[in-house]
Image (spheres, helix red, strand yellow):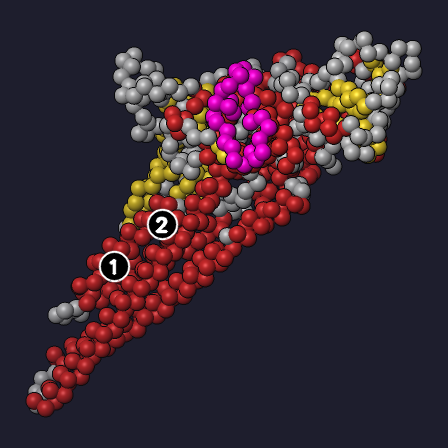
Amino acid sequence: MAQWEKMQQLPAMHTQRLHGLYDRDHLPMDVRHYLAAWIEMQDWQRAARDLNLASVLFQGLLENLDIQHSRFVQDKSFVMQHNIRRHKQSLQVYQEDPCTLAGTIFWFLEQEKDILRSAELPDQIQMMLVCHDGVGTSSQQDLERKLSALKNDVQCMDHTMNCLEDQQDEFDFKYQTHLMEVGLDEKEKTRQQDILKSLINKLNECRKRTLADLSKLLDKAEDLIKMLVTTELVDWQRRQQKACIGAPENVCLDQMEKWFTSLAVCLFQVRGFLGKLDELKGKVTYTNDPIVARKPGLLRKTEKLLRAVIKSSFVVETQPSMPQGKGPLVLRTNVQFSVKARLLVKIPELNQIMKVEASMDRGAPKTKGYRHFNVLGTRTKTLSIAEMQCGGMVADFRHLNLKEQKSSGGGKGTGEISLSVTEELHILYFNTVFQYKDFSVDLEATSLPVVIISNASQQQNAWASILWFNMLSQDTKDILFFANCPPAPWQQFAEMLSWQFLSATKRGLDETQLEMIAIKIFGKQSNPNNCSVSWSKFCKENIPETFFVWFDGILVMVKEFLEHLWSDGLIMGFVSKESERVLLKDKVKGTFLLRFSESVIGGVTFSWLDRNFNGLPEVKTVQPFTKNDLKQIPFQEILRNFQFQEVDNVPENPLLYLYPDIPKDDVFGKFYSEKTGDDSPYIKYIKTKLMFVSKETRSRYS
């Protein structure tokens, strides 16, 4: 099934991500939809580097749009004629730079694959997510129960206010009638005055009860705010941090929005009740009126709670990211990025009223060498209710970019902290004013810290910083985190490494693979759980081939060339040379395993068990295949066609059983090309690089 067809059949949660992806203007969904088959047939990745191919594909794209426009003319689809013509005009900006367009389309296709991978997570991962959600079930159920009780109390209070008003109207009517009556004898006057005293006493008691009930209602609201803001929102923020670095976390805000909105609406109703009490006091008051004594304090508390709810409800829903970035939170100067802020108190009357402004580095440290940036592009957006399933109030910034401020030349930093460009953290700020029912409060939301680079060569190290920060820090405003960078406990570090594979290939790392990585980092340890990984060990030691460069090189290779083999569990991957000998020595001749190279960045190799002239086991290994090889021939075709022979012997494929004992063709057969022998499209590579003769021929054998 074509990729776009699969995208249209996604469950609702993932469809929301798809709509969010195509909210950007870089590739209109209409173009993606109507040209889906043609788009998926092209090599956009190569075109992003090849100007000639990019120019050809650019012209092909325009021609296909013309063809589609003609179809809409025949179908008399007026609106789609207009849309296609407009999209073609907007794409003309790439006339002089078709490689950028090719890279953008390739990025969109890769993002679609990521969404599909998320939707196709193995059952055990889905179960893990369910279990994770189950951890918070009891607390969330408690929150739901208390919120339901609060809404019920507010409804009862509305009835109470009506009764109070009726009671006051009765007193006021009888009091005014009493004042107008003349000629009454003393006995009748006394009787009426007694009635009025009784009514005023009842009114006074009713006012006291109402104020006491309002106080209890505010106490309940305060308890809910603590649960919502200090627990649920903090948990969501931590989940978002982890999701940014690959964790399979649910960061949907729809439920949170319902909670925040319900709580804010209740508090606005309480504020309205207090205003109503002011009106009643204006009509009838008396000595020791409880409204005079207690209402101001209750109003202050109500507005304090409202400010707490509304301030906390303004968040960054989608963290800053570039269309072609390695991951979110890594930004490059003069390259557009997008980010989305959201107000979780959803009030339809405020749709397209509130203006949100983006800025950067408020309160940045006055440290010598610390860079400062200006935010360029459309810096002001309106909070609008999104026209999609979730319908949240969002300010969607799609065309921001950054420009470094020129140094003043004074160098007057107050501190000497040595941070590299990729260790320097910056924060984006989003500010707006909430004004509703004569209540006003300034709002500010902040992004997670971003790393800002100036060229693509810095992207890998920048991503390493984002991984490290979001793995360890929950203080999302600690922009000097790397000035005193803490180590990572092994269990936390191992989980983060596994997330990288899980998010890229839908298969994480198992305990055996993580154990090999632990040995690579710590050497042989009785228990790596007692160890920690330093920031230097992660990405500073052994420059330029640091641990992260090695690990990331493997991840990139797997995602680009070995994803299906990895996802099916056919690649053992992280196995040391010593371990592979232990695993293979007692197996049948021809048993082999696939592992990543420890010395070649982004290399994959295989080792197999052979027998020497004395019949003793001997493990043989080929030199690693790199992405240059895998661009020429798929790895499964290498395994299928690999041949080795001793002098004067007939060549044989020594790879017979995938460890531990599975016949090779049983597991790899479904990936083989249908053409074999001289008809194989890979025959040139096979004849020149997959034929090995004798032990003395060691061009690839080692």
Q: Position of residue 417 (x, y in %)?
A: 35, 21
- Whether tag 1 and tag 2 are in contact, CB under 8 A, the answer is no
Q: Which residues are magenta?
A: 522-548
* Number of numbered discs: 2
Q: Position of residue 496 (x, y in %)?
A: 55, 34
Q: Position of residue 523 (x, y in %)?
A: 58, 26
**Left of 666 or right of it: where is 202?**
left
Label 1 neighbour load within 10 Å: few <14, some 14-19, many 20+ = many
Residue indicated by mark 2: 309
Which of the 4 quarters of the picture holds residue 498? top right
The secondary structure type at the circle numbered 2 is helix
Above-or-below relation of 228 to 510: below
| Residue type (three-letter) at the residue carrying disc 1 | Leu
Residue indicated by mark 1: 298
Which residue does the image show at 81% across and 28% down from the upper left?
591
Which residue does the image show at 81% across and 30% down from the upper left?
587
Separation of residues labelled 1 and 2 (CA atoms) = 16 Å
- Residue placed most toward the observer, 61 or 376: 376
